[in-house]
Image: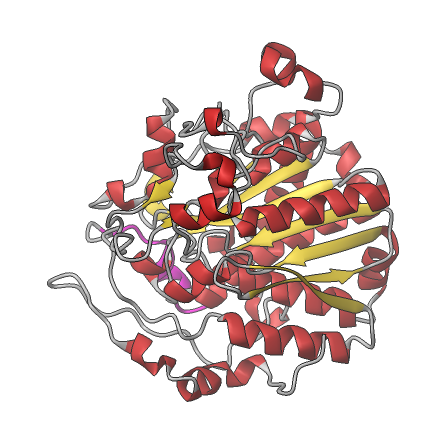
Amino acid sequence: MRLRARSTRATRSTVAVGLGTAALLAITTLPGSAAPPSAPADAPPAWSSSLAAAQPSDAAFAAAAPTCSDTPRKLPINEFTDHRELAVELDRIEEVSGGAVDVEQVGRSNRGREIWSARVGTGDKVVLMTSEIHGNEKVGTDALVDLVEWMGTSTTPKAQRWRDELTLVAIPKMNPDGAELDRRGNDQTWAEVTARHPQLRGAEPSWNYYDTPRTGDDYGSAPGFDTNRDYNPDLAYVPQPEDFPGSSEDAGWYVTPEASTVRDVYRGLQTEFGEVDTYVDLHHQGACYVMPDDPEQFVTLSISGQFVADPSTKPEYAEYAEGYDLEYSKQLNVAVNQALQKAAERRPVLGNVTLYPQGLDLPGTGLGSFQLNGSGAVLFEIRGQTQSLGQQYRAMLTRATYVGLDGLMTSVATGRVADLDPAEYDAIPPRGPSIGSAEQADEDARVLRSAGADID
């Protein structure tokens, strides 16, 4: 990929102001609450050893406060990587890697923005990672950019082993329209869906179609879809009117260009390698969840490896039973947790890891669909969307995400993952309750409750 401009991440805020995004600095806070500090413009990359030790802001991040709220607010986000900056970053990384990183446009969003992948490594074990499927969940994008850069440019034996054993394909920003609007859903009307799929004319819009205001966003004037409910384990599925409107317990339809793009990348890797060994999807959850054994400590992130019912127990999934491997997904999550607990010896806040609610059956998610297709699956749920934390604690949360991804990649590259005890997964503490106000603003919590999941 060749672009005219290049910059470093240290200049990101300057670039943002030049693009006119300084307007994002306007802060609207709850009555009586303090405005959160901005993240430093010159924050080091997530692999930097300077981030291994505890930082002054860690105590404030971890300490639970009765004023915590998920009520949507307009908060600064200029330090996150926007779509234009991502293009510049990926171009720079491709160049400085000397060809080790291959950047490719793999699709376009509904509004025509490029969706890029970055590929690095020549190994037989394929790891696909995606981030920002929800446009207000931005930490994973920065963590993936750092991960790709380190893997593609580091001369250490560890990086060389990753490149020899693994092929990493990262899609750092898969919902660029939602990201530019700083909202969960994409930017797409039902009329646009039926224009692409005329067989759906007269069908009721899908249940995950947003066309009324929610979580602080005006979907009434700019409707969209929750793209993470648009997947289907049948990777060749063509939308059929009788499958609408569906529900959160049902498979999706691939009516959004964004989910279709990831599906196409996944299928291409299946064709090339035979299987996709591991799939990782990076998300955010509410800002006010606490540790189950210490309600004075906020959760840094939650992880999970279970997204659908066991195919051996559900006739509708019978065709996927042979490839389904929950044990491997658990081992991958154990690798993530072990890396974070090790890092917590020097920086305790990184150890505030919990298990995301279990017992889910969500085949319409990317994780559910790809797990049924035989991939080990890992979910990261990082603390706080942009409407609740803004860019506050961006560097720390990026570091936590990076450390977990590093542990996963190393365990797969070395083969150590096969020796990890899946029982350790079940011993990860469950996520504690949310102590904040307006928990209903956590859209994932709302969806899970509507599906009958016990998330408390």
Q: Is residue 207 above or below residue 353?
A: above
Residue 63 or 189: which is nearer the viewer? 189
Instruction: Indicate yes or no whether the magenta region holds residue 379.
Output: no
Give the total number of marks visible in the rendering: 0
Residue 432 or 52: which is nearer the viewer? 432
Q: Is residue 271 above or below residue 156?
A: above
Residue 344 visible in the displayed image: yes
Give the x, y percent position of residue 295: 31, 41
Residue 456 visible in the displayed image: no
Residue at coordinates 82% horizontally, 68% vertically from top-left? 156
Give the x, y percent position of residue 175: 50, 57
Q: Is residue 379 toward the left or the right of residue 138 in the image?
A: right
Q: Which quarter of the rendered picture does the N terminus lie within?
A: bottom right
Give the x, y percent position of residue 22: 34, 82
Q: Is residue 416 toward the left or the right of residue 371 in the image?
A: right
Residue at coordinates 37% horizontally, 42% vertically from top-left? 209
Give the x, y percent position of residue 54: 49, 64
Q: Is residue 40 above or below residue 161?
A: below
Q: Is residue 292 toward the left or the right of residue 318 in the image?
A: left
Residue at coordinates 48% horizontally, 62% vertically from top-left? 111
Toward the left, the furthest residue is: 31
Q: Which residues are magenta?
A: 55-65
Residue at coordinates 73% horizontally, 42% vertically from top-left? 267
Residue 257 or 213: which is nearer the viewer? 257
Q: How is the image coloured?
A: secondary structure
Q: Which quarter of the rendered picture does the C terminus lie within?
A: top left
Residue 9 or 267: which is nearer the viewer? 267
